[in-house]
Image (tube, rainbow, N blue to C red):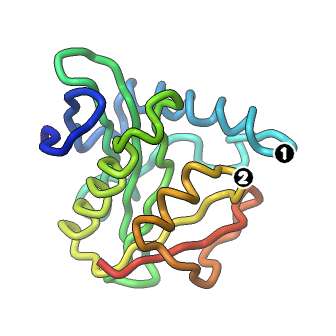
Amino acid sequence: MATSSTQLPRPVRILEGQAASERAAKALGRYYDELAERLEGGFRPELLDSVPGADVTPPRGDFILVTELGTAAVLGCGGVRLRADSGDTAELQRIWLVPDLRGQGLGRFLLRALENRARALGARRVVLSLNSSLNEAMTLCTSAGYQPVEPFEENPYVDVFLGKDL
């Protein structure tokens, strides 16, 4: 567990090892509901792995929750996994933050926490994929130094591939 030392809208903590938790499932459900509303043509999670699996659990990955300190409120989530095709590259997945907290520094905090977990797993590079209609995510990632990379997966909802050296 880590608490925030940066200026955030509220005190938060990071909970690691949450892939199989009920709170992670609920957070992912909220994320998928938002994607269904925002993506042109909707979103069908059954076309993808709808819950984090063994690839986002130690020793090859992790799934974290950002929670409000002193409450059970989940404010965001995200996964990291070492890519099987590259021992020193980790993929960030399912990064989500409560919509009304975006633009206040919490997304950057979550992204840094995921990058730190990638480092702890031995990664020297991170990649992620997203849909270009998710403007907040695009802005966050590009401002954090992510650059376009070659596509590394087939996903009907993804049209942007980004990477960054750690």
Q: Is residue 148 above or below residue 110?
A: below
Residue 83, by quadrant, is bottom left
**Observer-nearest residue: 132 or 121?**
132
**Observer-nearest residue: 89 or 108?**
108
**Observer-nearest residue: 40 or 5?**
5
- Side of 149 relative to 53 (left or right): right
Q: Amino acid at mark 2?
A: Ser
Give x and y (percent) for residue 14. 22, 39
Name the residue rendered at 45%, 65% in the picture.
143
Cβ atoms under marks 1 and 2 closer than 8 Å: yes
* Disc 1 to disc 2, C-alpha distance: 9 Å
Q: Which residue is mark 2?
A: 133
The extreme top residue here reads: 71
Number of the label disc, if any, that sits on residue 40: 1
Name the residue rendered at 36%, 70% in the picture.
82
Give x and y (percent) for residue 159. 72, 66
Residue 155, by quadrant, is bottom right
Instruction: Identify the secondary structure beneath mark 2.
Output: loop
Name the residue rendered at 57%, 82% in the picture.
149
Q: Amino acid at mark 1?
A: Glu
**Observer-nearest residue: 67 or 50?**
67
Residue 35, by quadrant, is top right
